[in-house]
Image (cartoon, rainbow, N blue to C red):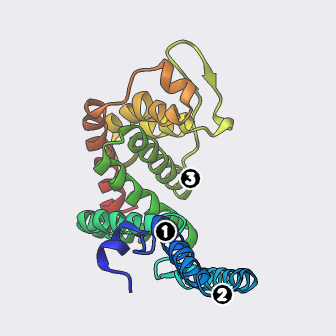
Amino acid sequence: MIDRKTQEKGVIESFYSKHDFLMSLIFMMTIIIILEIYVSLFITQFIILLSIIIWVATISFALIISFVLSKEYCSNCEEFIHPVLSKHICELNFKDKRSKIKNTILNILKQDFKQVDLITADIERHNIFKDEKEKKIFKKNMNSLQFFEYVGDFKYCMVVMGSIVEFLLKKYCKSNKIKPEDYRDPIGNFIPAKKKKFLNFTQSAIKNDVLDQKNSWFIVQNNLRNFRNYVHIEKETKEEEIDVRWYEIIKPVFEKIIQSFRYKNY
């Protein structure tokens, strides 16, 4: 039987340890020697030798049987193990712990995930999603955003927000027959409309004041879009660090755009 403490730690230790195994062997051999000395006073050398062989064989067999039977059953990994040789660390225990942590986080973010369900349902009414798979992936990204915010990983918050906004904007432009626009950045780099980059669509959003969010689209174009590219480590190391300050600036813009997609009639 494995107690609760053992299950939680994922470690099984038997009372029958390697030390006990050696002590048993020494004890048995000591008894054999004493008996043989005593017997040698009365019987011939041949019988003594035969007796020793029989005793050694019997004790060895008993110890081997004892070793084999010393296996214990680990309910976590569903297999028999030998605690005689070493501690057994159940690998599945780590999965169990990870599962407990995951459940704890899910409980903490339960209300946030419910809010994501409502947002997804509202956006679905505008025929944004082409199929269930696209809807599922969108919802998964929104849930991931809640998790990254919870653990304070603002880089990935920016990456996810950028991906979500780009997805929604492109869908909106396509459904409303709004074409991407040419874009030229402050240092003169030109991106033609035919490239259909995120910048081309944000330029369209600014020009057409999509969802009455012109100022928000400026922030997306100048900041959020760039932060999304921090998924490349080289860019992240060369540019400004994404910290909580940036997140607190970008998050309200993101939420404002999301709300517009939820309630705007188009």
Residue 3 horizontal/vertical position (percent): 32, 80
**In the image, what residue occupies the spot 39% across and 74% down?**
15
The residue depicted at 35 percent of the width and 37 percent of the height is: 214
- Contact check, label 3 and label 2, Cβ < 8 Å: no
Query: Label 3 amino acid?
Result: Lys
- State the separation of the CA atoms marked 3 and 1: 58 Å
Q: In front: mark 1 or mark 2?
A: 2
Residue 94: x and y, percent?
44, 63
Q: Which quarter of the figure has residue 180?
A: top right
| Comes first in the chain, label 3 or label 1 | 1
Q: Nearer the viewer, residue 68 or 148?
A: 68
Categorize mark 1 by other alpha carbons within 10 Å: few (<14), some (14-19), many (20+): some
- Name the residue tied to disc 3: 177
Please give left or right for residue 55 compared with residue 207 in the image.
right
Amino acid type at mark 1: Cys
Dot 3 or dot 2, earlier in sequence: 2
Q: Which mark is residue 90?
A: 1
In the displayed structure, 196 sits above or below 92; it is above
- Location of the C terminus by quadrant is bottom left
Q: Nearer the viewer, residue 243 or 15?
A: 15
- Is mark 1 in CB contact (under 8 Å) with mark 2? no
- The residue that mark 2 highlights is 43
Q: Nearer the viewer, mark 3 or mark 2?
A: 2
Residue at x-position 34% and y-position 70%: 8
Amino acid type at image mark 2: Ile
Task: Give how far apart the Cα atoms at labels 1 and 2 are.
Answer: 54 Å
Measuring from the top left, give residue 19's x and y in whole percent: 46, 64
Q: Total of numbered circles in the picture?
A: 3
Mark 1 vs 2, N-terminal side: 2
- On residue 75, which mark appears? none
